[in-house]
Image (cartoon, rainbow, N blue to C red):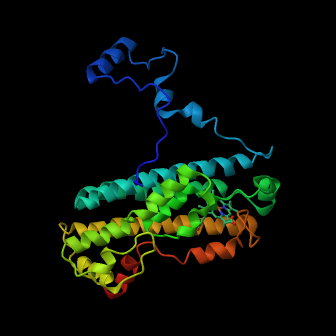
Amino acid sequence: MEQTELRAPRLTAAVRPVTPQQRAATAADNGGEPTLDFGDRVPYDVYTHASTLHRLQQPLSDDPGEMSFLMISQIMELYFGLTRHELIEAQRLLRADLVWDALAPLRRAALHLEGLNAAWQGLRWMTPADFNRFRNLLGEASGFQSAMYRHLEFLLGLRDPALIRPFRRHAEVHDELRATLAAPSLWDDVIALLARRGFDLPAELLTRDVAVEHQPDPRVEAAWVEIYSDSGPDNHLRLLGEALTEIAEQFGDWRWQHVKAVQRTMGAKVGSGGSAGLAWLQRSMARVVFPELWSARTTM
Ligand code: HEM
């Protein structure tokens, strides 16, 4: 099984490319105004599929507030997917030892996570009474069943193989998640990179079963202490450490804001996905992304 980008087959004809000369000629013809006449489909829609996107909202109630709950969930799903895309690109570059180049997708990932986190604002209006107006209609649907969120967790090194069980009857999604679990996480790739750069890391860390969650290791921590001791501009590994720290912090912010949104809208009631709700989420928060990057700071 190979870890790949998830892409639906192409549904439409491609957008027709134009040259800068053609663009200039059109603008001159138009006298400064935008083009108003097109064939059967507006190119913007061919490119973005906006008309399809805007048909994907199917609220279950007549409650006017449900649309923000539904659309913000969809917006967050898109951000999960976008962040996953950046992390896969960063892994590709790190595996090729291109640390400087990997900083660009990592920076983008951190910015997307910031956008993701800003989306919580759209749910701050929701009181328990507001949520109760449509909650029962959601049945057992819960974000816990988000396959894309699970990809993201697995890529970041939070790996609980049991959490792919909800998808076992959905072969394609299940196979994609198993492929992500079978491949090294971003953190595994960073540790392999540090070993290639001469840091003294034990072989068992480099040959371990990557499907199992990595356990914090004092030698990885020591490597980061050493890396951070050189604050010169050419120390790309320190820049890598900071880029990863930003991602870990932004992802942690999403989890924290989710817990607060849950507390705010349903207190400690049980979850729609069958868990204890708040208490289960608080337990899950204890798992740390890139643990040695945090613990190393104590001895820096
Ligand atoms: C205020 C509205 C929300 C409430 C009350 C809520 C509630 C919960 C609860 C109780 C759980 C634990 C599992 C269970 O359902 O039993 C959960 C998990 C989860 N929810 Fe939400 N949720 C809300 C909004 C969202 C949104 C907008 C998203 C975005 C897609 C989301 C994504 C998730 C994810 C990914 C998990 C799994 C977390 C993990 O594995 O640590 N939730 N949610």
Residue drawn where x is 33% and y is 57% of the image: 90
Furthest toward the top, the residue is: 29
Q: Nearer the viewer, residue 4 or 262?
A: 4
Q: How many marks?
A: 0
Quadrant of the image containing the C terminus: bottom left
Is residue 19 depicted above or below 283 in this figure?
above
Quadrant of the image containing the N terminus: bottom left
Is residue 297 depicted above or below 120 in this figure?
below
Residue drawn where x is 57% and y is 54% of the image: 119
Q: Nearer the viewer, residue 122 or 211?
A: 211
Left or right: 21, with 150 as reference point? left
Q: Which quadrant of the structure image shows residue 258?
A: bottom right
Residue 283 seen in this snapshot: yes
Q: Position of residue 251 (x, y in %)?
A: 49, 65
Residue drawn where x is 37% and y is 79% of the image: 292
Left or right: 2, with 97 as reference point? right
Ligand 1 shows up in which quadrant of the image?
A: bottom right
Q: Position of residue 202 (x, y in %)?
A: 28, 82
Q: Position of residue 190 (x, y in %)?
A: 31, 68
Residue drawn where x is 77% and y is 70% of the image: 269
Q: Position of residue 10 (x, y in %)?
A: 46, 33
Residue 114 seen in this snapshot: no
Left or right: 278, with 85 as reference point? right
